[in-house]
Amino acid sequence: MIAELEKLGTAGLSAEEVAVGSALATVRILAVLQSQRNRALEYARVVVAQRAASEVDSIAERLLSVTANDAKRAASTYLKPATSSAGIVRSSRPADPPQSKQD
């Protein structure tokens, strides 16, 4: 996992990987914004953060304009392998048995 963080910061992602990621993120946020309640909450978030409310309406264009260089720059800025660690989290309680489907 840490090697993957380092790879993202040095080699970056391919243009195709970024395009797929941008498209998936765009579809997700547009689906969320279909709800009037969620759209109102998103407007409130940007206003409270002292940003323009129009950012909500332009989110798809902004997500689709992300480039491979943008992703590499963000990864090298925020994903620091030297200060990262990885672990496994396990529950102390046993897993619930699978539930059977009832038609």
Image (tube, rainbow, N blue to C red):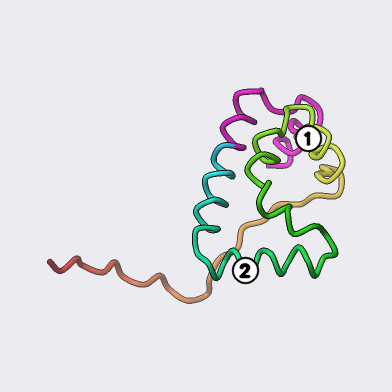
Q: Which mark is residue 75?
A: none
Quarter in which the N terminus is drawn:
top right
Which residue corresponds to the image point at 73% horizontal and 52% vertical from the top-left?
Answer: 55
Observer-nearest of 72 and 27: 27
Question: Does residue 83 appear to the left or right of 94 in the view shown?
Answer: right
Q: Which residue is mark 2?
A: 40
The spot of residue 46 in percent (x, y) is 76, 63
Q: Which residue is mark 1?
A: 6
Observer-nearest of 50 and 24: 50
The spot of residue 61 in percent (x, y) is 66, 39
Choose the circle earlier in sequence order: 2 or 1.
1
Q: Which residues are magenta?
A: 1-22
Residue lying farthest to the bottom in this orientation: 93
The spot of residue 12 in percent (x, y) is 74, 28
Check disc 2 and report its element: helix, strand or loop: helix
Name the residue type under label 2.
Ala
The spot of residue 64 in percent (x, y) is 65, 35
Observer-nearest of 48 and 1: 48
Which residue corresponds to the image point at 70% horizontal and 36% vertical from the top-left?
Answer: 4
Above or below — where is 54 with respect to 62? below
Question: Does residue 46 appear to the left or right of 26 in the view shown?
Answer: right
Tell me which corner region of the image, top left, top right, bottom left or bottom right, holds residue 96: bottom left
Magenta-span inclusion, residue 5: yes
Name the residue type under label 1.
Glu
Check disc 1 and report its element: helix, strand or loop: helix
Observer-nearest of 36 and 94: 36
Which residue corresponds to the image point at 42% horizontal and 73% vertical from the top-left?
Answer: 94
* Marks 2, 1: nearer the viewer: 2
> Whole-Å distance between the Cαs marked 2 and 1?
38 Å
Which residue corresponds to the image point at 80% horizontal and 49% vertical from the top-left?
Answer: 84
